[in-house]
Image (cartoon, rainbow, N blue to C red):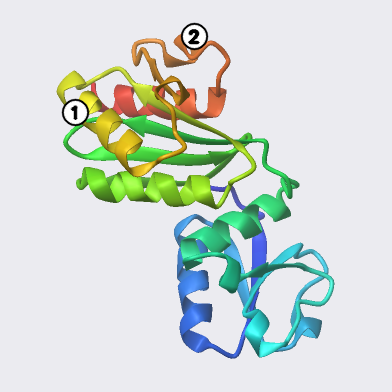
Amino acid sequence: MLQDRRLAIAVVTRDVKLANAVIEEAERRGVKAIHAVDPAQIPLSVKAAVVKLGEGIGTGHAAPVSVEDYNSAVAAVDRAMEISLGRAIVEKAVVGIDPGKKVGAAFIADNILLRTESYTDFTELAEAVNTFFRNHSKSRHLVLMGSGAPEYRERLTSKLLERNPFLRPEDIITVSEENTSKHAGGVDELAATYLLRRSRGRG
């Protein structure tokens, strides 16, 4: 997902299971994760580190991302990436959704593509969107949904609204997959590009 000269984050913990979960999640995205038990081992170029505050180790110069504040390695890596890429405050949390029997989703913080996922269970997708938005509680929430597969799109919209109590119907914007960037109206070009690429891949 990211190009070489990869972004690097750290995980500072004695918990090997947590360290492995963070490293695997980061590697899945093309992000390097450095495991340390001593903050002095964190390279100066690393700006954020996942940590268990309960261990009392600290993160040295790197900004801490406490696993106690997030519900998974996925969410912790999201946050570490945001900080590392200069988005300590995220103004807009966006999920781009390509509807269908197998749903593609892109999770975006401002103009940063954090990760892409695939789902066959609509409830699982809706819960993932809900978690993403709860972890960005002070951000504007937006779902950008491709216009294909209307029979799935309507079910997805209903499930998203059911599982996300603070998401309003007007926060879910349907855009044409024929020229997604144009029809997105500047709402979120990165999400639009993701949807357009997905739609072309089906062609």
- Residue, disc 2: 182
* Residue closer to the observer: 175 or 196: 175
The quarter of the picture where residue 53 lies is bottom right
Report x, y in % for residue 85.
Answer: 71, 48
* Residue closer to the observer: 97 or 115: 97
Report x, y in % for residue 146.
Answer: 34, 22
Apparent side of residue 132 relative to residue 11 in the rendered image (left or right):
left
Look at 43% across and 32% down and name the residue there.
96
Report x, y in % for residue 64.
Answer: 72, 69
What residue type is disc 2 on? Answer: Lys
- Residue, disc 1: 152
The quarter of the picture where residue 39 lies is bottom right
Residue at mark 2 to residue at mark 1: CA–CA distance: 23 Å
Look at 52% across and 56% down and name the residue there.
30
What residue type is disc 1 on? Answer: Tyr
Look at 23% across and 43% down and name the residue there.
122
Q: Residue furthest front?
A: 165
